[in-house]
Amino acid sequence: MTTSGPSDRPGGGTERQNWVERRREKIRAEIERNRRGEYTVPTWVLALALVLIVGGWLALIFLA
């Protein structure tokens, strides 16, 4: 019986390493942008804030 592992696929280890390096580079770039003041609030956070504000107003109107 043979076991299949990463050594069976040619280049499997380097592909994983390249993915990790690309991910690290994206994180570094994002940190640098944030330090320069180019931080933006994610869209889902803005949408959640809007829903909470509108929901609060509606609750105030209908429950008061």
Image: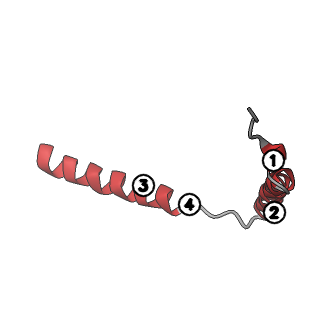
Q: Considering only order in the chain, which callout, 1 or 2, is on the residue closer to the N terminus?
A: 1
* Mark 1 Cα-neighbour bin, 10 Å: few <14, some 14–19, many ≥20: few
Asked if labels 3 and 2 touch by Cβ distance under 8 angstroms, the answer is no
Q: CA distance from mark 2 to mark 3?
A: 27 Å
Q: Secondary structure at mark 2?
A: helix
**Camera-nearest residue between 32 and 21:** 21
Q: CA distance from mark 4 to mark 1?
A: 41 Å
The quadrant holding residue 54 is: bottom left
Residue type pointed to by label 3: Ala
Q: CA distance from mark 2 to mark 1?
A: 34 Å
Q: Position of residue 21 (x, y in %)?
A: 85, 56
* Mark 2 Cα-neighbour bin, 10 Å: few <14, some 14–19, many ≥20: few
Residue type pointed to by label 1: Asp
Identify the residue at horizontal 80%, vertical 52% (top origin): 9
Label 4 vs label 2, nearer the camera: 2
Q: CA distance from mark 4 to mark 2?
A: 17 Å
Residue at mark 4: 42
Residue at mark 2: 29
Q: Residue lying furthest bottom in this view? A: 38
Label 4 vs label 1, nearer the camera: 1
Residue type pointed to by label 4: Pro
Residue at mark 3: 49
Identify the residue at horizontal 28%, vertical 49% (top origin): 56
Q: Considering only order in the chain, which callout, 1 or 4, is on the residue closer to the N terminus?
A: 1
Asked if labels 2 and 4 touch by Cβ distance under 8 angstroms, the answer is no
Label 3 vs label 4, nearer the camera: 4
Residue at mark 1: 8
**Camera-nearest residue between 50 and 61:** 50
Against 13, residue 50 (above or below) is below
Residue type pointed to by label 2: Ala
Q: Considering only order in the chain, which callout, 4 or 3, is on the residue closer to the N terminus?
A: 4
